[in-house]
Image (spheres, grey):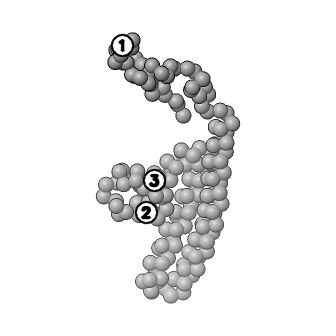
Amino acid sequence: MTIYNIFEYAETSNEYEGSEHASPYLKDKSRKHENYIQDPSSKKDLFLSAFFARMFFLCLLVADIFWGAFSICLFTIKLAANILTAFHFKKLRKSLKKSFLAVKRSIVCMIALTIAIISPALGIMFSCMYFLMFDKTGVDEIVPSSLKGHFKEILPHSPFR
């Protein structure tokens, strides 16, 4: 993160540098380099943040694999029940559609998290693109609440508004 000198404008725009109208703060405090951080981002900090971000995505990927396996099991059970009843019951058909949607979402999240382990921004962009284009109701169910504000700006007439 870049560190800016917030006093630079005050130092350059102060017309009355030597007079009594000069800022008392600038008279008492001179700019010294030991007051500022020389190298704000060390290589160790950059490595640790990248490592832990990827470990977080790896943990999410493991959880998503379990979710996907569970969704596939439920889908096969509901599909078998629908085949046995010849797709006669409306609630069972609706439940099968929801299970299929959960399987699709878990596959998309799995692909996005796999990409996010390599490149976090690209993985997040991939999942956001899918939910914006194909599954706008999934934004409310899958996308974290910290990103929902951005989706509300992009989709003014969204169902989760």
Residue at x 50% of width, y 88% of height: 85
Eyeballing the image, is 131 above or below 117?
below
Amino acid residing under circle 3:
Leu
Residue 94 drawn at (x, y percent)? 44, 78
Residue furthest to the left in view is 157
The reply to whether the C-beta atoms of the residues labelled 1 and 2 are less than 8 Å apart is no
Residue 81 horizontal side relative to residue 94, left or right: right
Residue 67 drawn at (x, y percent)? 60, 67
Report how far apart the C-alphas of labels 2 and 3 lie in the structure: 10 Å
Query: On the rendered image, what quadrant is the C terminus found in?
Result: bottom left
How many numbered circles are shown? 3
Amino acid residing under circle 2:
Asp
| Residue at mark 1 | 19
Residue 147's disc number: 3
| Residue at mark 2 | 140
Secondary element at image label 1: loop
Report how far apart the C-alphas of labels 1 and 3 lie in the structure: 51 Å
User: As rendered, which of 19 and 3 lies closer to the eye?
Assistant: 19
Residue furthest to the right in view is 44
User: As rendered, which of 29 and 2 lies closer to the eye?
Assistant: 29
Residue 88 drawn at (x, y percent)? 45, 86
Of labels 1 and 2, the one closer to you:
1
| Among the 4 quarters of the image, the one containing residue 49 | top right
Q: Earlier in the sequence, mark 1 or mark 3?
A: 1
Residue at x 54% of width, y 34% of height: 1
Residue 71 horizontal side relative to residue 25, left or right: right
Secondary element at image label 3: helix
Residue 26 horizontal side relative to residue 59, left or right: left
Of labels 1 and 3, the one closer to you:
1
